[in-house]
Image (cartoon, rainbow, N blue to C red):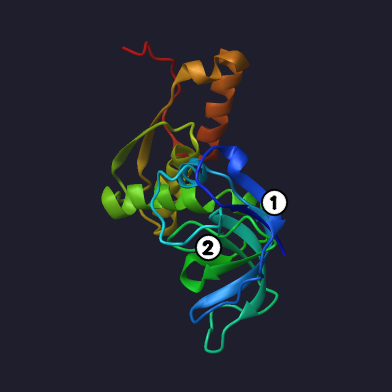
Amino acid sequence: MKAARIHEFGSPDVIRIEDAPQPTPNEGEILVRVAAAGVGPWDALLREGKIPVSSPLPLIVGADLSGVVEVTRPGLTKFNTGDEVFGLTNNQFVGAYAEYAIASETMVARKPTSLSFAEAASAPVVAVTAWQMLFDHAHARAGQTVLIHGAAGNVGAYAVQMARLDAAIDEAVPAHVLAAALFERFASRGEAEFQDGLLSAMRFGFGGHVEKGSGS
């Protein structure tokens, strides 16, 4: 199979597209025929050797993926061959940039039919980060007021929606979300377009009001 591998840590130039052995899943794992893979800053940090991994070189980079289950191990009950899935490869965050990848059964889920493979592959790390931040660490609950900094970023955008949708699922009083974002990041798009975007998000359901702050 073709894969993006590194034989040494360094700049993007160390990535090689080359032939690699197709992996075989062990107990608790599935083999995924990769349709799309996500790219995040953690991939660059790993490639540069700034994130320790136990996997030896050469290694296949990439963590977020989506695709179709090709092979399952006996005893697995969560997935069947042919299931469309998305998620992370493993807790080492390696292995996704290839035609086939091994994924831990506990780190993937069935892909929603409403999402394309590319959309699904963009979600796992940032969505899980937002969930952990809100509910595992901050213990956000319905009826509370939640302040989310960096609400225009990948993690922040998920956090804004989760803070509302989790409460709605519980049929409780929704959380009130205060979302803060740096206006200057959107200056090139114009203030009117920026506020229109936030107002559209409010109609989607995070509530509150839009105003441009002084930054002080």
Q: Which residue is mark 2?
A: 89
Drawn side of residue 12 relative to residue 142, left or right: right
Q: Earlier in the sequence, mark 1 or mark 2?
A: 1
Mark drawn on residue 17: 1
Q: Residue at x 55, y 57 (%)?
A: 58
Quadrant where the N terminus sits is: bottom right
x, y percentage for residue 81? 67, 79
Q: Quadrant of residue 150?
A: top left
Q: Residue at x 54, y 60 (%)?
A: 87
Q: Secondary structure at mark 2?
A: loop
Do we see residue 95 in this rendering?
yes
Vertical order, 44 against 81 (above or below): above
Vertical order, 165 against 198 (above or below): below
Between 148 and 72, the one lying in front of the other is: 72
Q: Amino acid at mark 1?
A: Ile
Between 50 and 63, the one lying in front of the other is: 50
Drawn side of residue 140 relative to residue 22, left or right: left
Q: Residue furthest bottom?
A: 75
